[in-house]
């Protein structure tokens, strides 16, 4: 015959487990709900980040197109145009570089489309493109002499 103390102890353990099961069931349901909420929020954050990156990509593109529209009416740099104008004036790349205030290698790089002139240099190139042969030779004589 089992001891009354062990029966009482077993009954208390059984009741405690039953109560724990009830409490844990609520916690499990809440935990599952929180996990699904977190997953939904992560998806929403990812979508919003994509929208922000798309908007950021569009914004500079539209801003640059406006500035290029404004500058295109003023001056548009073309490597081929610079090379043909320099040859039309009968100047070497070094001489054109002296007039433009840059090195001969820079002029070669611009003409080969390996680099593009800075915004500050575009004004000098625009003035260079308006020069005739005599004016270019005169500018060259001023800088050398």
Image: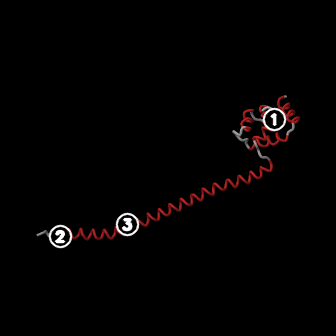
SS label for mark 2: helix
Would you call the spot at circle 2 few (<14 residues within 10 Å), some (14-19), or many (20 or more)?
Answer: few
Q: Which of 130 and 30 is in front in this view?
A: 130
> Where does label 1 land, which residue?
87
Task: Specify which label sits upstream in the sequence, 3 or 2.
Answer: 2
Q: How far apart are marks 1 and 2 (CA)?
A: 110 Å
Of circles 3 and 2, the one toward us is 3
How far from the left and from the top, in percent, is residue 60?
67, 53
Q: Quadrant of the N terminus?
A: bottom left
How far from the left and from the top, in percent, is residue 28?
37, 66
Would you call the spot at circle 1 few (<14 residues within 10 Å), some (14-19), or many (20 or more)?
Answer: few
Residue plotted at (31% across, 69% down): 21
Instruction: Name above or below for residue 144 compared with residue 54.
Output: above
Q: Which of 140 and 115 is in front in this view?
A: 115
Task: Specify which label sits upstream in the sequence, 1 or 2.
Answer: 2
> Where does label 3 land, which residue?
28
Residue plotted at (15% across, 70% down): 4
Of circles 1 and 2, the one toward us is 1
**Labels 1 & 2 near each other (Cβ < 8 A):** no
- Please tell me how many numbered marks the rendered image carries: 3
As drawn, is 97 to the left or to the right of 5? right
Q: Which residue lies furthest to the top in this view?
A: 145
């Amino acid at each position: 015959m089992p001891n009354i103390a062990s029966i009482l102890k077993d009954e208390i353990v059984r009741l405690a487990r039953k109560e724990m099961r009830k409490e844990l069931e609520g916690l499990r349901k809440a935990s599952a709900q929180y996990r699904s909420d977190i997953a939904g929020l992560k998806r929403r954050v990812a979508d919003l980040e994509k929208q922000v990156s798309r908007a950021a990509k569009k914004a500079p593109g539209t801003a640059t197109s406006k500035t290029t529209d404004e500058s295109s009416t003023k001056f548009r740099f073309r490597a081929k145009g610079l090379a043909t104008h320099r040859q039309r004036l009968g100047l070497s790349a070094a001489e054109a570089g002296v007039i433009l205030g840059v090195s001969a290698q820079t002029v070669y790089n611009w003409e080969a489309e390996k680099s593009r002139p800075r915004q500050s240099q575009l004004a000098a190139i625009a003035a260079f493109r308006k020069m005739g042969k005599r004016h270019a030779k005169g500018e060259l004589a001023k800088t050398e002499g």
